[in-house]
Image: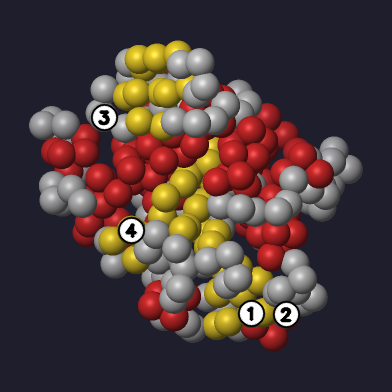
């Protein structure tokens, strides 16, 4: 995308070729805000597409994508957190900095509790400054919500992290998978993606494509305006979000609660996240996550190159 930057004495304007203008503020903040908005717009455009050719190009053989979207998943979301006083909702996409997003919401909403809407019974999910709701409708969840945001991640990194997460919860299955991979002289990632492509098991939510968390019945979740991306600019994007949405928490000061990156945390599975993936394996991952790649096309590499 070409950017035309016009400098003024009192302000900075960033004018895009699509006609969007952002004024009055540091250039960096405006750029980060723009990128997050562009990701949300790309998702909305994709959800409004009527045929796969509009998303993937004329040579696509994927068929009418809404049917593909509905196929592997029973629920269209798993966890949505709302701060009622601020009118802000956060959609938790598994294995995409969800803990950070929860902390940002909870710290910003304090002393009022956040409302967590989940698709599992609430008996073990109540906590300080957190009210749990089970079985709520989309209309109930987003009542009086003015802005929704989420956090996403590079599909390959998220896939490897998702396998590790599954290993900590279903160790017997992953141990069997690791043995099969060793016997076949392939990576654990390739063994897992082959299973997912063959639809041999119900897809674990930690491995579901990210788009599945962000739609309901093929339509975008209400008020989705910002999509932050885990990466080099992640903390800057969160800081921009806090400014735009009037969140009181400082992303640089959020506590680090997860120990999943500690080498002592399930060390028997640590190698899963650092496996070298060949172009052949990356192409398989792209095939399974093709919907994510279609609307999150701005990643640093293409797995088929």
Identify the mark nearer the N-term, 2 or 4.
2
Q: Which residue is mark 4?
A: 220
Identify the mark nearer the N-term, 4 or 3.
3
Front position among marks 3 and 2: 3
* Labels 1 & 4 near each other (Cβ < 8 A): no
The residue carrying pointer 2 sits among few (fewer than 14), some (14 to 19) or many (20 or more) residues within 10 Å by Cα, namely few
* Labels 3 & 2 near each other (Cβ < 8 A): no
Residue sitting at the far front: 10
Disc 1/disc 2 C-alpha distance (Å): 6 Å
* Labels 2 & 4 near each other (Cβ < 8 A): no
| Rendered location of residue 176, percent (x, y) | 64, 51
Q: Which residue is mark 3?
A: 19
Residue at screen point 79% across, 48% down: 254
Front position among marks 3 and 1: 3
Disc 3/disc 2 C-alpha distance (Å): 46 Å
Tell me the SS state at disc 4.
strand
| Rendered location of residue 218, percent (x, y) | 27, 61
The residue carrying pointer 1 sits among few (fewer than 14), some (14 to 19) or many (20 or more) residues within 10 Å by Cα, namely some
Identify the mark nearer the N-term, 1 or 4.
1
Please indicate, yes or no, whether residue 185 appears anywhere in the rendered image: no
Residue 157, picture quadrant: top right
Left or right: where does residue 255 sit relative to residue 14? right
Identify the mark nearer the N-term, 3 or 1.
3
On residue 132, the disc is 1
């Amino acid at each position: 995308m070409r950017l035309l930057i016009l400098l003024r004495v009192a302000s900075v304007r960033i004018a895009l070729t699509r006609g969007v203008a952002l004024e009055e503020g540091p250039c960096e903040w405006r750029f980060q805000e723009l990128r997050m908005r562009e990701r949300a717009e790309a998702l909305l455009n994709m959800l409004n597409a009527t045929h796969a050719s509009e998303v993937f190009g004329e040579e696509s053989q994927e068929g009418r994508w809404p049917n593909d979207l509905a196929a592997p998943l029973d629920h269209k979301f798993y966890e949505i957190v709302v701060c009622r006083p601020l009118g802000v909702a956060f959609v938790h996409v598994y294995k995409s900095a969800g803990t950070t997003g929860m902390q940002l919401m909870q710290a910003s909403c304090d002393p009022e509790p956040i409302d967590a809407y989940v698709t599992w019974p609430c008996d073990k999910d109540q906590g300080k400054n957190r009210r749990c709701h089970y079985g709520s409708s989309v209309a109930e969840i987003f009542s009086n919500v003015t802005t929704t945001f989420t956090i996403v991640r590079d599909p390959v990194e998220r896939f490897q992290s998702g396998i590790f997460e599954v290993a900590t919860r279903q160790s017997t299955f992953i141990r069997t998978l690791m043995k099969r991979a060793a016997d076949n002289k392939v990576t654990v990632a390739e063994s897992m993606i082959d299973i997912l492509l063959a639809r041999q098991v119900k897809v674990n939510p930690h491995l579901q494509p990210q788009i599945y968390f962000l739609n309901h019945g093929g339509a975008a979740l209400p008020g989705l305006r910002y999509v932050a991306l885990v990466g080099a600019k992640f903390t800057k994007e969160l800081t921009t979000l806090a400014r735009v949405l009037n969140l009181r928490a400082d992303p640089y000061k959020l506590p680090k609660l997860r120990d999943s990156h500690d080498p002592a945390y399930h060390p028997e599975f640590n190698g899963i996240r650092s496996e070298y993936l060949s172009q052949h394996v990356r192409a398989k991952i792209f095939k399974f996550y093709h919907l994510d790649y279609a609307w999150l096309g701005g990643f640093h590499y293409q797995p088929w190159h």
